[in-house]
Amino acid sequence: MLPIFDQFFATPETIQHKTSYGHIKACNERFNLNCEFTENRYEPCSVFLYAGNRVDEFVSDELFIKVLDIILGHKDSILYLDTIIEDFIHPPFIQILDKFFKAGVLPENIKVITSYNPAKAFRTRFFNERFLVHCDIVSPEGTYNVKNIKNKFRKIGQTPELLNKLKDVDIISYNGFSTSYLIHKGEGLNHHHEELRATDESDVGPREFKKHFSLLQKNSRYLRKIFHAYFITKGYDKLSHYSWHNIGVDNEWGRKEEKACKMFNIPFDVVKLSKPIWFDNVEATDQTAPDEWSVPDIVEKDTAVPIVVETCNTRDEGDSLFSESFHHREHYFLSEKTYKNFYYGLPFIHLGMPFIDMHLKNLGYFTFRHHFDAKRIPVIKNTDGLVNDFALIDFIANMSLDELSSILNAPQRVAEYKHNRKMLRRLLPLKNLINELDK
């Protein structure tokens, strides 16, 4: 039985069901998670704090004192700093960690929950001297600035006190978007929800295709821009249910985007590429705009291949595209863009992360790009992965809808779509998290 302090601690405007505490609270009874919510701070318990991800997201002094008072109630209580909905942190997160240390909370009594995969990569990326410089943390030795790092700590072999403490903070990777998604759709709740879909897989079956692809992208990111440029240049948006940056004109096209386009022989027409494209002529800010965590009916019914372009903290850096792929092989990130295809029982292909299908298979899901005999080259650099992605898109675009139907509507494929939905509904990531916390 895992005791959890029964209070939601989070920065303002945080949605409870998108946090680890919210996941456990919503699913505990229905999925028999064996967690006990308590208000006794003098017995060992787990305390969850969503400490924020954004650069401007701060834990107030009042919230800090509330959490500190509880965590110091028993020497064996554990503080979980929760970042799960994203795979990155900013200076306020490090600053609140430092504040807990200075208030007497031991590093071994603090754990971080993140969607960053794998956990060791989170530590390498954020718990290092360079990031402490970025965070501008002050210690008794003075501010951790670049001069101090180079001329003081490294020269005499010392390490910043905070960095030594961070080494003893455990990192737990949790694909929390899967649970957030099911709760959003009403499936993880302890009570009935009107949006709950069928409890079996009877509504998953063959479909009549009218479009080759769907690619609905609300906000532009570096990787997404490259695929948007390719689709527009090749005219594949006409073969698709398509949207692009439908919150308005995307003015952030610069040298790194131009370099990528040049690499793949894509014309760099900024005026054309920055223009928003609305799905069904509806702006994202319109109240009638579709819920981005749902698949619109027309897409669900007649799209052959939904496309997923997952981005992550490292892959949205321009230089990472031109680096060797082994740096990114173990790092992946999954959001609602992936899970909604499982939920609706649809095929899909991922673009932009060369090894993501490998990770999905390891998680127990079926993937589908291998059913298309497109030309492939060995992936040495991340650009090789995009070369393979473009070849795959070209291959599918040149197939007839009947040919796509023969592959994607085959009985075995339909069985795989049903399997993916069942896997998602099992909530294994959340159950594995509980096992990790209850060791």
Image (cartoon, grey):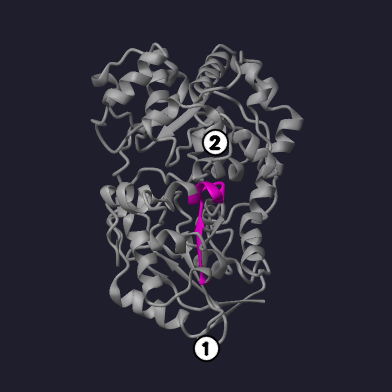
319 vs 341, left or right, is left
Q: In the rendered image of this protein, does residue 47 appear above or below residue 14?
A: below
Kindly give the residue lying farthest to the front in the view shown. Answer: 156
Image quadrant for the C terminus? Answer: bottom right
Q: Secondary structure at mark 2?
A: helix
Seen as rendered, the residue at the extreme right is 412
Question: From this viewpoint, is residue 78 visible?
Answer: yes
Magenta segment range?
A: 109-123
Q: Position of residue 305 (x, y in %)?
A: 56, 27
For label 1, the residue is 42
* The quadrant where residue 9 appears: bottom left
Query: Is residue 111 part of the magenta span, yes or no?
Result: yes
Q: CA distance from mark 1 to mark 2?
A: 51 Å
- Looking at numbered disc 2 in the image, what kind of residue is underneath it? Glu
Quarter of the picture containing the N terminus is: bottom right
Where does residue 384 sit, x and y in percent of width and height?
52, 20
**Residue 139 in view, yes or no:** no
Rendered view: 205 above or below 430 = above
Q: Is residue 288 left or right of residue 49?
A: left
What residue is at 67 percent from the left and 73 percent from the top?
34
Q: Residue at x 52, y 63 (%)?
A: 168
- Is tag 1's residue or tag 2's residue first in the polypeptide sequence? 1
Tag nearer the camera, 1 or 2:
1
Q: Classify mark 2: residues with Cα within 10 Å, few (<14), some (14-19) or many (20+).
A: some
- The dot on residue 300 is 2
Q: Is residue 140 left or right of residue 422?
A: left
> Is residue 324 toward the left or the right of residue 253 in the image?
right
Give residue 32's position: percent from left, percent from top: 68, 69
* Residue 239 percent location from the top left of the image: 47, 19
